[in-house]
Amino acid sequence: MSRIDHRFAAVKAQGRAALVTFVMAGDPDAATSLEILKALPKAGADVIEVGMPFSDPMADGPAIQAAGLRALHAGMTLKGVLKLVAEFRKTDSQTPIILMGYYNPIYVYGVDKFLVDAKAAGADGMIVVDLPPEEDEELCLPALKAGLSFIRLATPTTDDSRLPAVLSNTSGFVYYVSITGITGAARPDYSRVAAAVKRLKAHTDLPIAVGFGVKDAAAAHEIALSADGVVVGSALIDALAKTLDAQGRSGPATVGAVGELAGKLAAGVASAAKESAIP
Amino acid sequence: MNSPSPQIAANSLRQGPDPRGHFGIFGGRFVAETLMPLILSLEKAYDEARQDPAYHAELQHLLTHYVGRPSPLYFAERMTEKLGGAKIYFKREELNHTGAHKINNVLGQILLARRMGKKRIIAETGAGQHGVATATACARFGLECVVYMGAVDVERQKPNVFRMNLLGAKVVPVQSGARTLKDAMNEALRDWVTNVEDTFYCIGTAAGPHPYPAMVRDFQCVIGDETRAQMMDLEGRLPDSLFACIGGGSNAIGLFHPFLDDRSVELYGVEAAGHGLNVPNGHAASLAGGRPGVLHGNRTYLLMDDDGQILEGHSISAGLDYPGIGPEHAWLKENGRVTYLSATDKEALNAFQLCSQLEGIIPALEPAHALAKVMDIAPKKPKDHLMVLGLSGRGDKDIFTVADHLGGM
C-alpha cells in the first residue's frame, strides 16, 4: 500500500475527507518554501501537492502563474524541487507528496532519470497537466512501472465515454477539476460537483479529490460533503503573496499565513464529517 | 483542395501525421484533459468536412471572391537583374484580402466553426495579421471575436490593433511573460479551457495539438498548389527552389508541402536570427538554436534553458517572435528534406528596403527574412534557376518599426 493509499484510508477511517494542499516549490524562495511544506501537515494538511514551476503554465490562473515566476526568479529548478522534497522527507515520513506541473521540464530532465530521482527524493506521485491519456506512453506508464502514482485529472468535459480511458493507468486518487477553467477562477457549483463525484465513483474505487476554485473554509466544507478530498492551491498562494514585500521577498508572517489558512481549511473539511455520507 | 499535385505515394513525405498526430517524434496532443474532448471533436468535424464537397465549394468560393485568389506568381525582374543569378518569382500572398496568407487558414477554420455550431471565436496573434484575418472572417459571418495579443506586440503593431477594433473584435493585451506571441497563446488556451462549450480556438499557425498542424497546413497548401500550376504555365516546369520565412511556419509549410516529393525542388525555410544566433536569448530561431521539447500542445523544437523553461526569444518581426515552430518543420529538419537558414534583424531590414526600392512592393518584415536569404543564394545560382519567394504579407504594419530602426527616415 502506498503512502497515498494509507493516508486516504486513515482519513476515511476518521469519517472525513482529506485536505490536499498545493504550494509552489521555491515560492518565494527555497528556504521559506521548505518551512511552508513542514508547516502544512501540522496545520492539518493530509496530502501535499508540490508545484514544479514552469514558465508557461497554460492551465493556471494569475495566482499560480505569479507563484511560479517568483520561484523561477529565485532560482528554483526541477532539480531544486526534488531536493526540497528530499529535505521535507527527512522530517516527515508519512505525508504523501505529489509533484504537480507541466511536462516540458520533466521531458528535458529526462523521464527515466526524473522517475528515479523523484522516487529517491520521497515523492509519491505526480500530476502532469498537459499529459492526457492519449500520451500515456510518455510518462504515465513509466511512472507506474517505477512505483510512482500517476494521478489523473477528470473534468466536467470528461464524458462517460472518456472516463474508462481517463481512469485507466491511474492510481492514488482521481483529481476532479470542479470547473471548466483555470486554477483559482470561478467558484464551483457544489451540487454539480456532488453529482460528478457520484458519476466518477460509479467507475472507480479510487478516492476522488476535488479542486479548482476552492477559496475558503466554507467552500472546503461544501466540497468535503461529497468528495474524499478537497484540493486548495490558489487561496494558499494568495495568503502567501499578501505577506511578501514589494520585491516579492518573504517576511516574518509568510509561513504563518499559509499555515493559518491551511488550519481553517482543515477545520472546514473536518466540520463536514458529521453531515457527510462518508462512513 | 483541387490539388494539381500528383497522387500521394506510399513512400511520400506528404503522408503525415499518423492518426495520433505525430510527424516522426514530433506533434502529438499535449493538452489538459478539459480540452481533450474538444480536440477530438474538432478532429472528427475536420475529417467530415474534408470529405464534404459542399464544404470545399464554400471555401473555394470565398477564396476566389472574398480573398481574391489565386494570388499572382510575379516575376521580380529588377530584383533578378540586381542579384544577377537565379530568376526570381514572388508568390504574392500579400495581395490577399487582409494583406497576408493568414486568411487562407482562417476561412477554413471559421467555416468549420460554423459547421460545429460555435458562436465565439478566439485567436492569438503576434504581428496582428492572424488577428486581423480572424476579426475579418468573424465580421463576415457575424461571430463574436476575441483576440489575445501580447502587450508589447499591441504597442509595436498599432495599425493592426486599430483594424481589429474597427472590425468589431475585442483585442485583449496580454501582460504575462514577455508579453508577446507565446504569452498570447497561453492566454488564448486559458480562455478556451474556460469557455469550452461555445468557443472555437482559431490557431494562426501550423502548430498546437493535433489536428491543428495538419489542418492549418492543409488550408495553406493552396499557396504551393497554385505556385506549382502557375510555374507550369509560365515556365513549363517546376521551380528549382522555394524560400519562405518561418515563425510557426504556416506559410512555409503551405508553400513547401505540395513539393515535398519533388526532390529536385530545393526548399529553404528562414528563421529569425534577431540580434544573431550567438546572442543568448537574442533570436527566435527554434530549429537553429533550440532542441526538442513540449509546449502548446505539441512536441517540437523550442528555445529553452537547461531546466526546460521556455525562453522569450527576440525578433524585430512580431510574427516570427515565437520560441517554437510547427512540428512538421521539426520533422522536415530531422529528415533533411528542408534546409533551414536564418536571417538577422539587420539582414531583414536591408531586404525590406531593397524590395521596396526595386520592385515597388513593401514586404512585411517576416518575408523580408526569407528575401534576405534569396539575396544571399540567388547570385550563386545560374540564370535558368527558377527561385520562388513566398511573399507572405505586406509591410504597411511594419513601417513604424522600420522607421524607428532606420532613424526616422
Image (cartoon, grey):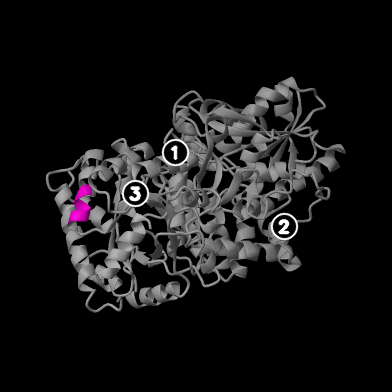
- Residue hosting label 2: B64
| Mark 3 crowdedness (10 Å alpha carbons): few <14, some 14-19, many ≥20 | many
Q: Amino acid at mark 3?
A: Gly
Alpha carbon separation for disc pair 1 and 2: 45 Å
Comparing marks 3 and 1, which lies closer to the viewer? 3
Q: Residue furthest left?
A: A252
- Asked if residue B358 lies left or right of residue A266, the reply is right
A41 inside magenta stretch: yes
Under tag 3, what secondary structure? strand
- Counting from the top left corner in percent of width and height, residue B272 is at 54, 33
Q: Chain of mark 1?
A: B
| Mark 2 crowdedness (10 Å alpha carbons): few <14, some 14-19, many ≥20 | few
- Residue hosting label 1: B308
Query: Between residues B81 and B41, which one lies in front from this camera angle?
Result: B41
- Counting from the top left corner in percent of width and height, residue A158 is at 49, 68
Mainly helix, strand or loop, the magenta region? helix
Residue A214 visible within the image = no
- Which segment did they paint magenta? A38-42
Q: Are marks 2 and 3 on the same chain?
A: no
Comparing marks 2 and 3, which lies closer to the viewer? 3
Q: Is residue A225 above or below residue B260?
A: below
Split into 4 quadrants, where in the image is the N terminus of chain A?
A: bottom left
Nearest to N terminus: mark 1 or mark 2: 2
| Mark 1 crowdedness (10 Å alpha carbons): few <14, some 14-19, many ≥20 | many
- Residue hosting label 3: A51
Q: Amino acid at mark 2?
A: Thr
Residue B87 visible within the image = yes
Residue drawn 49% across the image and 41% down it: A112
Alpha carbon separation for disc pair 2 and 3: 51 Å
Under tag 1, what secondary structure? loop
